[in-house]
Amino acid sequence: MAARRGPDGYVHGPDATVVATAEALERAASARSLVLVEGISDVIALETLAVRRGRDLASEGTVVVPIGGAQAISRFVTDFGPGGVDLQLSGLCDAGEERFFRRALGRAGLGTPRDRQEMELQGFFVCVDDLEHELIRASDPSTIETLLDAQGDLGSFRTIQKQVAWRGRPFDAQVHRWLRAGARRNLRYAGLLVDVIESDRVPRPLVGVLDAATPHRATPRGRLPVERGSVDR
């Protein structure tokens, strides 16, 4: 099945990331700032948060690009970083993929970040453990269950909770499992969860990467020395 476009305007299906990346790169031809993320759920979350915060990414010249997995990051920072088109770059990744992003920044001449704080100086942020965990932790159980009920999904979630393997497990873990169990749930709920989170509880990595993506920001990002061979391998 090829990629399809759902009611929310985002593509889904086996070829979804390829299609979404191609569409984003078309917009990148006239962009000033790129936000490099792993997949479509990250795009949905960040674009939803931008709207919520009154940002018009298109008019700003900012494009969120799903790169199709962390191992592709090197190509994107090389092509669009200082050795290529030289656009303003920022990015978001899961904790498990941090090493790929750190290594790519060094190879592209953007400095060699030794830790997450130095990555953030370069505009790159890490979700712990992943986007879904960040969004779930930022909400409370009552809010999440109310959202699932409104979407007609509470019964399905209760089924997961009753399964022997998940009975008695922490609520956050149950929700994460449920989101990952459905073919499109993580895509559907990326934006829905962003919308119901209290303003002061929006995950820091999401806020940080959007702030870093503001073109021509008044405060330039820090520059780190390039130290060949010092990045985790």
Image: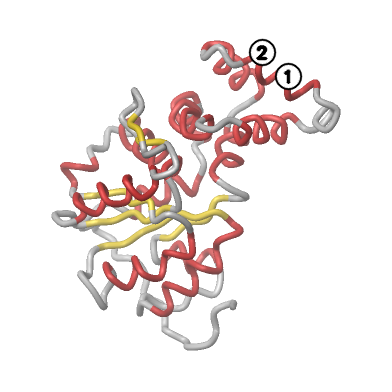
Residue drawn at the location 27% of the way across and 51% of the way down: 22
Callout 2, which amino acid?
Gly
Residue drawn at the location 19% of the way across and 49% of the way down: 27
Q: Residues within 10 Å of mark 2 (few under 14, many from 20)?
A: few
Callout 1–callout 2 Cβ contact below 8 Å = yes
201 relative position to 111: left or right: right
Which one is nearer the viewer's eye here, 60 or 132?
A: 132
193 relative position to 35: left or right: right
Residue 220, horizontal then vertical, whole percent: 29, 65
Which one is nearer the viewer's eye here, 16 or 148?
A: 16
Residue 203, horizontal then vertical, whole percent: 51, 41
Q: Which mark is residue 58?
A: none
- Name the secondary structure under disc 2: helix
Is residue 215 shown above or below 231?
Answer: above
Figure quadrant of the C terminus: bottom right
Q: CA distance from mark 1 to mark 2?
A: 6 Å
Q: Which residue is mark 1?
A: 159
Residue drawn at the location 34% of the way across and 65% of the way down: 76
Which one is nearer the viewer's eye here, 182 or 157?
A: 182
97 relative position to 3: left or right: right
Residue 6, horizontal then vertical, whole percent: 36, 27
Q: Which mark is residue 155?
A: 2
Is residue 150 shown above or below 166?
Answer: above
Residue drawn at the location 52% of the way across and 14% of the way down: 151
Q: Residues within 10 Å of mark 1 (few under 14, many from 20)?
A: few
